[in-house]
Amino acid sequence: MPQSTAGAQRIDGTVIASEIRQQVRRQVGALQAGHGLTPVLTVVLVGDDPASEIYVRNKLKHAHEAGIESRDIRLPASTTQATLLDTIAKLNADPNVDGILVQMPLPSQIDQDAITKALDPDKDVDGLHPLNAGRLVAGQPGLVPCTPSGCLIMLRRTIGDIAGLNALVIGRSILVGKPVALLLLQANCTVTIAHSKTRDLAEICRRADIVVAALGRPEFVRGNWLKPGATVIDVGISRIERDGKKRIVGDVAYDEALSVAGAVTPVPGGVGPMTIACLLENTVRAACLRRGIAFPDA
Ligand code: NAP
């Protein structure tokens, strides 16, 4: 476990994500050399939300750099659910497409759940289809949501073996909290899941060797809630204004945490960059799973 005596280690997501992307590049090279296979990722963007545009551009750029063939489909904001379902059906049926990502959020006339359920689970690189959620519960191979995978990679790189540690996950969303908790359980941690009705959260937090904060409340977790030496993964992203300046902060009071914890992820520059890196890894995994090819060592 990291120790807290000389201030916490900053877990650099930018560096780790870059290493994962290089690893994916080598895996793509191995698939091309061994099987003549270049994984294909298709990103579907509905509407012109500026933040979504940036996310999609970044995903396509990193996919390209990793040697993954990337395609994007742009649909107008007025797209109906039926049209989007039709687009997904075509991508599901296209044998050359390995991964499909529908950028969220979708315009209000479209039911996000219906879209997620319509994806071929074996091409669902966001890992949010109910079948992939079930596979995660059952411990079967499948596609795992990207941000939770990124959290586990960071924990393993920081601590090594996490078996037997007390892990607290704050948040129970389908996107982050629940899959993180299941991955921690799979890694043999003793897992507590906290949510908005949890009592004595600070007290529960003080017993945790690992804290994964995914509640979306700026700087909610205070330094004096943390066990000395704990490893803290801050998933939260909130935009706030302080001293007249706009800032992005996480769910953990970072400066306070630095003086107590053993290691902390910063926001930005922590979990965020890991999400795209894990999306690329999922695309390679999907290409392998669909064809019964072993996931390449890298
Ligand atoms: P969400 O769907 O809004 O879920 C938030 C969860 O936090 C809920 O389970 C909620 O409990 C719980 N919660 C809310 N207030 C709480 C409180 N006071 N005490 C304890 N638990 C509380 O959010 P999400 O999609 O999981 O995202 C969480 C945060 O992560 C957001 O800031 C989001 O922007 C960020 N995020 C970052 C990345 C990344 O790449 N870094 C990716 C995804 C999300 P209930 O279930 O009881 O309502």
Image (cartoon, grey):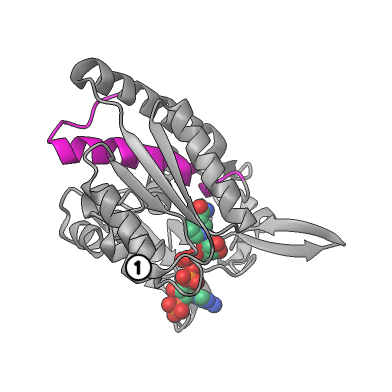
Q: Is residue 173 above or below residue 141?
A: below
Give the image quarter of residue 20. Answer: top left
Seen at 39% across and 24% down, the residue is 25
Instruction: Give 218 or 99, whichever is nearer the viewer.
Output: 99
| Kind of element beneath mark 1 | helix
The residue range painted magenta reads 269-298
Query: Horizontally, is 257 left or right of 62 in the view?
Result: right
Question: Is residue 284 inside the magenta stretch?
Answer: yes
Image position, residue 274 (x, y; %): 47, 43
Give the image quarter of residue 167. Answer: bottom left
The N terminus - image quarter:
top left
The residue most toward the top is 33
Question: Is residue 42 inside the magenta stretch?
Answer: no
Q: Amino acid at mark 1?
A: Ala
Q: Is residue 131 above or below residue 199?
A: above
Magenta stretch, main secondary structure, is: helix
Seen at 60% across and 47% down, the residue is 54
The C terminus - image quarter:
top left
Q: Is residue 292 above or below residue 188?
A: above
Image position, residue 70 (x, y; %): 41, 35
Image position, residue 78 (x, y; %): 52, 67
Which residue, given by chain and number where applicable, does mark 1 sit on? 82
Query: Horizontally, is 62 left or right of 256 in the view?
Result: left
For mark 1, does the 10 Å Cα neighbourhood hold few (<14), some (14 to 19), or many (20 or more) residues? few
Seen at 18% across and 57% down, the residue is 135
Instruction: Give 41 or 2, whichever is nearer the viewer.
Output: 41
Q: Is residue 221 visible?
A: yes
Give the image quarter of residue 27. Answer: top left
